[in-house]
Amino acid sequence: MEKKLGIWGFGVVGKSALKFFSLQFKNCDIGIWDQRRLSNQEINLIKSFNASFFNHINIDLKTFFNRYDHILVSPGIDIKKIIGKHYSSCYTEKFFCELDIFSDYFEKKTVSITGSLGKTTIITLLHSLSKGIGLKSVIGGNIGTGMLNLIHDQLKTEIAFLELSSFQLEDSKKFSPHIAVCNNFYPNHLDRHISLQDYFFAKFKIFKYQTKVDFALLNADFLFMEQGFVGKINDIKSKKCFVTFDFEKTLNQIKKLKLKSYAIFFVKNNSLFVSIYPFISFICIFNFSFLPEITFKENWAFILAILYLLNIDLQFFEKYFLKNKHRYFIRNYENVLEHRLEKFVSINGVEFYNDSKATIVEATYSALKILDKKERPIILILGGLNKGVDRKPFIKKLPLIKNLKYVFCFGKKFKDFDLFPQYSSLKQLLIVIIKLSKSGDIVLFSPGGASFDLFDNYRHRGKVFKDLVLSLAKNN
């Protein structure tokens, strides 16, 4: 019998699903529905797989739902909002998600990470480090590679590293990674999730279907959240592991919550230790002095803890970093560093930093704290969509950055940024900044909001910023 499979949305996930369905099911009627106008290249791709394309011009969504037996929904689509307003909830029985298909067909080990900050850096460095020791790894998920693309090459693969967003996780009904990681949590995407708790529960679905042979690696800060959130930790069935910079405080809280069978990875005296319940001994597993300073120590702690849980010899990396003196390492990680507190040029004594990846204000504040240690005047550029998050508490904390000299905003005007001069375009703002900045100043482009008001994504935004700075400086 011919399978009738629909794909709702034709972005990264939709394209990988089209290829997967076509290769996996030889007798298959595939249809794609997307409200946007596709490029000629996308139309040709659909035709090459003998699939059909629909949009609101030729058929409506209800007709599309009725035509196909099962429908893969791209994670960027808010099902609850669309179905709840216009269509019967019975259609939801037809829907399935990318993550569950991946779970059904990918048979190798997976390490998956979700969180608000740093997950892209962690997962990319893990992938690169594993390749450095000969481990056959692949990378996918929210990082820009469709997970279904990884399935057909799994015979050449030993492990998959996946970055997962709350959108990808919230509709999963079975995905169970061997190591699941949640490295931090801050308010975000409240324009999609109905509440902060809803957003949190979507993130924590990364642990929901794990078993006793799996590992859950969490930031110890989760132990100190309010009861409605902390209670979710007790529901985790896998082996609980925590990462902290304060062992005693974490241990006391674990005892207070009466958790059993856990491990604590903690940083002390510039080294990473692990203690496994019931704490017969503390083991030093890595000396941080060997590491290149290309990302935050918190990120390195999670990276090393994951490698340890994978039974990888961390002493190899100590020797590797020592031998190469970080030169080879840094040269091969430029793709990780770009748009993440990236010092990309110095002009007439003014240093310009591109931190376009800062799509929430917590990332911006972290960047400010790091640069504040340089004891140089800082000119901050803010902007971007707030995604339903109140940014006023961040504004109130800015006086704590003692070297902050000016704050400017660009793009759409938001009330939470109305204390600062606002410019409709980034170019207009940079013309002003280049004229007023003086030798010794730092210009920090760390928007603290999503890029979709003016740009395709944070990478596009960062590239535009860098190109404008170089062009305006040249003509100044």
Image (cartoon, rainbow, N blue to C red):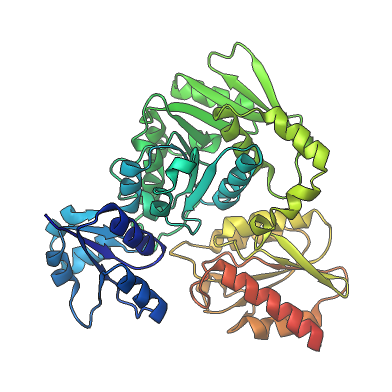
The C terminus lies in which quarter of the figure?
bottom right
Left or right of 306 on screen, residue 46: left
Q: Is residue 397 or residue 32 the one in the foreground?
A: 32
Residue 226: x and y, percent? 44, 39
Q: Is residue 229 or residue 65 the one in the foreground?
A: 65
- Whether 364 is drawn above or below 158: the answer is below
Q: How many marks?
A: 0
Residue 306: x and y, percent? 56, 34
The N terminus lies in which quarter of the figure?
bottom left
Q: Looking at the rendering, which quadrant does residue 210 occupy?
A: top left
- Whether 368 is drawn above or below 215: the answer is below
Q: Is residue 288 or residue 226 the one in the foreground?
A: 288
- Could you tell me if residue 180 is visible in this image? yes
| Residue found at x 40% / y 59% | 190
| Residue found at x 28% / y 43% | 173
- Whether 325 is drawn above or below 342: the answer is above
| Residue found at x 69% / y 58% | 334
| Residue found at x 39% / y 81% | 40
Q: Looking at the rendering, which quadrant does residue 271 occupy?
A: top right
- Whether 59 is drawn above or below 49: the answer is below
Q: Looking at the rendering, which quadrant does residue 342 occupy?
A: bottom right
Residue 330: x and y, percent? 75, 51
- Could you tell me if residue 192 is visible in this image? no
Residue 235: x and y, percent? 35, 30
